[in-house]
Image: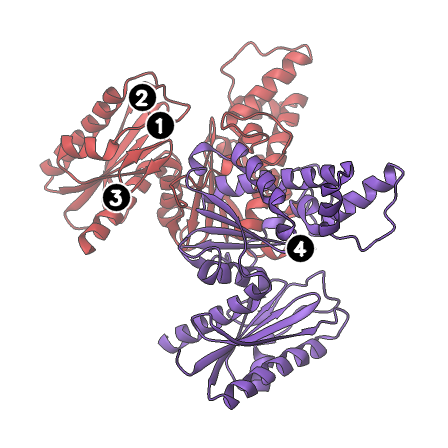
Chain colours: A red, B purple
Amino acid sequence: MDQNVGIGIDLGGTFIKYALGSREGKILKENKIPTDSQATNSKILGQMAEAAHEMAAFARLKGYIPLVVGIGTPGCVDVERGFLKGSTPNFRFWSEVHIGKEIEKSLNIPTFIDNDANLMALAEARYGAGVGHKNIICLTIGTGIGGGIIVNGEIYRGSHFAGAELGHMSIKYNGLNCRCGGRGCLERYTSAKAMTDYFIKKSTKEGSPITNKNISVKDIFEQFRNGNRLALETIERSTYYLGRGIANFMNIFDPSLIIIGGGVSESGDEYLKRVKKVAFRYAMKNATDNVKIVKAKLGNKAGYMGALSFAFDQLMRNYKS
Amino acid sequence: MDQNVGIGIDLGGTFIKYALGSREGKILKENKIPTDSQATNSKILGQMAEAAHEMAAFARLKGYIPLVVGIGTPGCVDVERGFLKGSTPNFRFWSEVHIGKEIEKSLNIPTFIDNDANLMALAEARYGAGVGHKNIICLTIGTGIGGGIIVNGEIYRGSHFAGAELGHMSIKYNGLNCRCGGRGCLERYTSAKAMTDYFIKKSTKEGSPITNKNISVKDIFEQFRNGNRLALETIERSTYYLGRGIANFMNIFDPSLIIIGGGVSESGDEYLKRVKKVAFRYAMKNATDNVKIVKAKLGNKAGYMGALSFAFDQLMRNYKS
């Protein structure tokens, strides 16, 4: 490894995770600080700048040169301008922020930003489950569903940086209303929140209300293993819809790999097994040959690793042009 | 224009359309012969070879050099091997055919083949409604729905040439069974056949059966203009579903342009107006800026023009490598 390193930052709803690493994806140091979703934009920018300063100082102390900062954030990001265009439901104010410019000003290091789900997909493609694959669909299942599309090894962003909203493909045109303004979106049936909401609602309806409002998908899987019928029903429903959604993505993209990340994918083999069965049942025959549906490999590190990798790419591109 | 020309062939369910033209899309001569969907593979290959010979002879007579043949066919095509992998419902036997090799053998001119919907999308992107756009979604609405995806100006085919089956995105997970093995596919609600089937069924149900079983979408639009309530209902239903499907494609691809081709799109402004209204209502806000939904421009010529353009590309690529 040469002396040149980068700083990757992943802004999440609960933590800002960040790391110092090489272009090849070797991580030298990592850390995280809690996020305040109610904070003002300048407070969040301040936190991110502080995180970057911490890593830059450590790098210099050890004789490395911090060349670039990469940042992943939820929301619709204008990558060329380093500008967060769209808002995101997990933060109160976080919208229309010149993240790139602000962090660059504070650190005097070139800074590049992109959507967090895009960067997770890139990290998995380059260092994780997707190594060796050119066309990949990546779904990160959390409170919402983050989508990433890798075409020919690169992030596909669309014409206005608004693409890859894979959780907002409607699979039930007359289904549940969605926060995006649509109806019957995949996210409304398959996100972690959709699963817990359904389980709580059903349990209440059937006379055994859930007292723990912070119940997680992990808890639902535990109850399922203990023979709880509603837990089984919740898992069946969610994996069925996800399988149908993935069948659509197979017909549309014919990828060689589909990666499922986020906490839900860690809930046990039962989850992925059910999703696969439905997806392969409903996708067109030609699109089911040599396709794999797998769990993400990088876990929480995918965000900052993708940010690092992307930032180096942008830096190199700017040198060339 | 220089002396080098190519031959483009578009195999359709009713006609084989073919032309002689330049790399820049200038057409020198065109012709068509009826297709026999019940014919053996060798008969169809023979027809295509004859068509190509006709154009090659004309070219030589006029002092041009026929450099390459491009062919568009329905079905799943292995572009690298010039091989038709998958079957297609419009032909009885047309499957697993080495089209490229066979035509090349007959003419002694390099021959390249691709899926017809892909080539129509390419033609519109280069010479038609899509000029100036990099990311385009193209839907050709006929008996079925042909899908084409243009990413960065090039055809996106997926990892096994099975991508862009846009008509087989399910928009109603528990909807009508589809010939593809899926359920609730967009095609089942929005193809020309879906429209006429629905109109005939509804009319019969309401006591005014349609005697003309060859009724077309054009007829339905005529009846709509004459105030027929069921014709209105049929058009409302089909345009609503298509709008919802396009909203999905906007959220997934964030294209700058969506092109709708095929006979249905020619049925009148009313059609496109209704589709647009629904698509823009249901797509996410960030994906609706600077997007246009337009009619295809090249009509019946798109198939062979795309075949020509693609064939020249492949030829140039082979020279380079």
- Of circles 1 and 4, the one toward us is 4
Callout 3: few (<14), some (14-19), or many (20+) C-alpha neighbours within 10 Å?
many
Q: Which residue is mark 1?
A: A12
In three-dimensional space, the C-alpha distance between marks 1 and 3, rounded to whole angstroms, equals: 18 Å
Among the two numbered marks 2 and 1 on one chain, the one whose residue lies closer to the N terminus? 1
Q: Are marks 2 and 1 in contact (CB under 8 Å)?
A: yes
- Say whether residue B218 is left or right of residue B147: right
Q: Are marks 1 and 3 in contact (CB under 8 Å)?
A: no
Residue name at image x 66 percent, y 23 percent: A227
Callout 1: few (<14), some (14-19), or many (20+) C-alpha neighbours within 10 Å?
some
In this orientation, does residue A243 appear?
Answer: no
Residue name at image x 30 percent, y 40 percent: A307
Q: Which residue is mark 3?
A: A311
Both on one chain, marks 1 and 4?
no
Residue B278 picture quarter: top right
Label 3 secondary element:
helix
Q: Amino acid at mark 1?
A: Gly
Both on one chain, marks 2 and 1?
yes
Callout 2: few (<14), some (14-19), or many (20+) C-alpha neighbours within 10 Å?
some
Q: Amino acid at mark 3?
A: Ala
Q: Nearer the viewer, residue B80 or A123?
A: B80
In three-dimensional space, the C-alpha distance between marks 4 and 2, rounded to whole angstroms, equals: 52 Å
The numbered dot on residue A35 is 2
Among the two numbered marks 1 and 3 on one chain, the one whose residue lies closer to the N terminus? 1
Q: Amino acid at mark 4?
A: Gly
Q: Chain of mark 3?
A: A
Label 2 secondary element:
loop
Q: Are marks 2 and 3 in contact (CB under 8 Å)?
A: no
Q: Chain of mark 1?
A: A
The numbered dot on residue B142 is 4
- Of circles 4 and 3, the one toward us is 4
